[in-house]
Image (cartoon, helix red, strand yellow):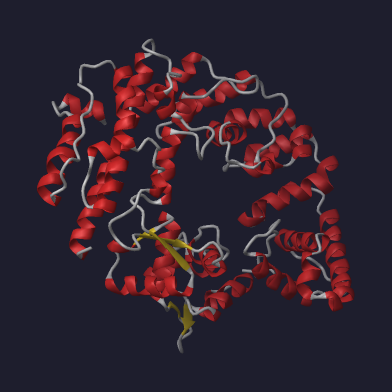
Amino acid sequence: MVKERYIGVEYYKGPDLAKGYMLDKAKEVYEGLAIGHAIENINEAIELYNINKYVKDDTFLFYLGGDKEEWLKEKNDIGNSSVGKYINQHSDILAEYEEVDFRYKESFWEIVEKRKLSGITESRFKMFLDTLDVFAWQIFKQYKLVMKYDVELRDYMLFYPEGSTNLLLGKYLLKHMSEREKPYLPPSLTIEDKEQIISAYLDFDKPNLNYIRLLSNVQNTKEFALDARVKLKAKRVSERLVYCSFLRSKNKDLEAVIEWFFNVYLKEEFYIEEFNIKLPPADNPNFEKCKSIFPTIESIIKKYRFYLEDGYIDEELVQMESKPLPFSECPSMTNDRYVYTAPDNDEARILRNIMFSDQSNITYFPNYGNSQYNTLFERLNADKLYLHDIEDYQKSSLDWLVEHDYVMVNDDNEIFLVNRNRTLIYYYIHINSVVVTSKLSDSLKQEVDKLLNDGALVAENTLLTRQESDYIDYYLNKSNFINGYDLRNKYLHGTSSGYKNENEHYVNYLHALRLLITIMIKINDDLCTAKVEGD
């Protein structure tokens, strides 16, 4: 196999923590450039294109220092010249797409838009789209490209409802996305086309449940609207998974189980008095159930806080406290309950990209044929890897891991994990966004303590993780998510649809029960953990 001459330089705009690592690589690439340099493959061309962007925004010169200005200009001229020659010599640039590294897909389409747009006919572009077996969402980030191949991309979206639904949600419903991240859509894509795409997506066996809930609750606009039939279809797909109905079919009353936990179990197991709650009777209208259950959820959080602060619960004090307690601020009984990566931890970010990501450049090894793993961490944790298996473009990533004491190469040239505990901590945070310290072994707890002392991790003593708080806030209010359900305020301020839509209130009541059970489980875990640890 011919080894490709690129090492994976990517362009990051703005104050990205990985910039320094990429500029180290870029310097290495430019040091190898000489007059007459000939690019051998599309990935090498894209890498030089990315480095040129660092030159254009002055990042590279700032990194090198002013005394390197002439050297940088000379190398950049060589790089730009070689990129231009390569692109000009490849008249059918789309034929190169299969060879493009996954990290360079977006940059590939930037190059197509800037340098090849006039040379690609609509029929050639359609032929190319027909060959794709993975939805190429990166195309839709290039405005001129989407405008030129309007009809072809409209047909492409209709043919791939799953990928197209992701685009539509990103465009219209996922409000946390920045404007520059939002995709461009073909002008010929009608509001009916969008509805057709969504309807087709709802027919999938396993659609994303979070997407389905968004779609069932969508507010129609002139750009994106769903017929009542499609909204009902989305709601029924969501309800296909609704657990409460299953329990009732087995003559189990979920509300009774929840009441028993707070009214009986906490008193008998932990000697906590006055943590009494009363859920609405089963035969009450769902509208009335919703009006009463959301204040109950808030009172539970207040009671738990007062219990931790005072050692007992005063019901009158709970009632007098009119200010809602943010879920993210509810305390925990245990110390350093959750740990997260510190915001300025560059090392953890780079480790994640190299070791844990399936998009890393050091995951595929030709010598192993079909015996591949999704990530480098999986291979090193379960199988062998040797120095001669490393491709040239992967060496910089391996060097970083060696320099930072995450891997070593022994006398047999085998690459193996070192500092395993630290790697595991960062791996757990990568897959869960948080580590629950009480669930770790003693050796891993010791490693967490070291990382906390070094400032690489931060600890929080809260009942809920950040993600769990966000999850609850998403349903109850709009303090963090402008597209949230805002259920608490709807029922508290009377802005819900009243008694008329019984099905809507039924679904909202199930949402509330799920949130209540989440809090119940977290309280039980916190108390059990504190009991074991003697806090």
Residue toward you, 255 or 181? 255
Q: Quadrant of the rendered structure where residue 489 is?
A: top left
The percent position of residue 521, horizontal first and vertical second, equals 25, 45
Looking at the image, which residue sits at the far top?
A: 500
Q: Is residue 204 left or right of residue 40?
A: left
* Count of numbered marks: 0
Looking at the image, which residue sits at the far left?
A: 268
The quadrant of the rendering that contains the C terminus is bottom left
* Residue under the point 32% across and 26% down: 509
* Residue under the point 21% across and 33% down: 277
Q: Quadrant of the rendered structure where residue 340 is?
A: bottom left
The percent position of residue 2, horizontal first and vertical second, equals 65, 69
The quadrant of the rendering that contains the N terminus is bottom right
* Residue under the point 58% across and 78% down: 399
Any part of residue 329 in sight: yes
Q: Is residue 479 left or right of residue 109?
A: left
The percent position of residue 469, horizontal first and vertical second, equals 41, 45
Residue toward you, 405 or 367? 405
The percent position of residue 519, horizontal first and vertical second, equals 30, 42
